[in-house]
Image (cartoon, rainbow, N blue to C red):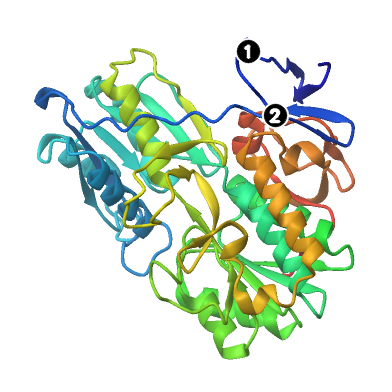
Amino acid sequence: MSGKIKKMGVTVATAVAIAVIVTAIVVGGIVYVAKPPVVKEVIKEVPAKRKVTLGFVLGGYIEGSTWDGRYIIAAKRLKWLYPWFDYVYDEAVILTGRDPISSARDLITAKGANLVVGSWEPCAVPAFKEIQGEYPDVYFLGNIGSDVSRGGNFLRFFPRQYQAMYLEGLVAGALTKTNKIGIAVGPACVQNFRRMAAFYLGVKEANPDATVYIKYVGEWYNPPVEREVSLALVGMGCDVLTHYTDSTAPVEVCEEKGIWFIGKDMDIVGMYNWSTTDTVAVSFDTRWEVIWDHFVKEYLSEVKAPETLVFLGMDDHIAMPADNPWLPGQTILPTVDLQNNNKTGIDAISPKARALIPESMIEHIKMRRDQMLKGVWDPFFEYPLVSSGEGVEMPGLPVPPKGTVVKPAGVMPSDEFLLGQLNFQLDGIVLVK
């Protein structure tokens, strides 16, 4: 089998292990080899001395947030799975202007946390780097916005949400009647450039005539400004709206204006009852528990040199019993997946929205999801990444001029590039100032 998957500057030969049955899929002349499914064990018994407490330094509030709220849902799920697991937290540390170092120290010394998580990048950088040496037996875990610095017991993480956002782009492109789709974007950072890039690629694949418009809120959580930005996009004629912010304001605008909303980060219908499938065409759920599980297992195994950059995707998962209370009957929980009103995959598309989407596109969405669950396809491998000339200059990393093909088709960019160097908006996305 001669197919190869390339990473930026590196060629990785596909290998087939002896006595392992794999599935080969040919897409555009490239042969992808599916990883065999591996069901990870649920560890029930752990010696008392190895009990784990995960401490969260939360940038925002739990209530009314798709981000910090979902972190705590993830922790509750692990506590249900593992009797040896517990969690503690300190919320709104950044929003209330408090010191993340003091918060982390308190979680460790007063509440017994042996892994500490920063939910926003400012919770962890530079705070965790400054104190990691004081607590060498603690894992410090930092969410990534644009900074990928790490080392020792300071570990960084993010989920490949962009894979689900690409699928959402397929749905949005198929639904729009005005051919105008809007995104209310929080801050300008690599995390959001990566998100809008994947969403845009899905939109254009489904509907080449559609245009994606973005307007910045400037912050992750500012309900009045999120509302103002959402209304401005709707006023331009956008009839499908999504957001990379954390409040309910954008979905409320969609309800008021009778347009489709595309959710992110969590199932806001099934988990929070913020809206209904009459408004939410589709959403995706980020299962942070899969990432916590990864780090906790390394900690329990006393790994001396833990993986410092963890970027898990749809082909990574944890196992759960069929009688789980979240998705009964489902025994594999991928890191990210389409989820809406407690339904996953194609079934996550709103019945009302699905009736408006051609069956051929439904089958296409299903195919792409299946390929990503198997780890044999990725939108950032398939398509080139071409700069619009808009973006954020970073130290030693200017914004590429308009029209620059930063990453050609058929090459898989490195994790470091996707997490810390994609500092530009894709050509074709329209920035509304």
Q: How many marks?
A: 2
Which residue is more in the foreground, 137 or 204? Answer: 204
Q: Position of residue 209 (x, y in %)?
A: 89, 67
First along the sequence among labels 2 and 1: 1
Q: Are marks 2 and 1 in contact (CB under 8 Å)?
A: no
Q: Position of residue 414 (x, y in %)?
A: 67, 28
Which residue in the protein does label 1 denote? 17
Which residue is more in the foreground, 135 or 244? Answer: 244
Which residue in the protein does label 2 denote? 23
Q: Does residue 429 appear anywhere in the picture?
A: no
Which residue, as the protein is rendered here, is positioned at the far top? 18
Residue type pointed to by label 2: Thr
Q: Where is 402 relative to 213, above or below?
A: above
The reply, left or right, for residue 60 in relation to residue 160 is left
Residue at 73%, 78% in the rendered image? 238
Q: Where is 252 relative to 29, above or below?
A: below
Residue type pointed to by label 1: Ala
Crowd tier of the residue under label 1, counting other residues whose Cα lies within 10 Å: few below 14, some 14–19, many 20 or above: few
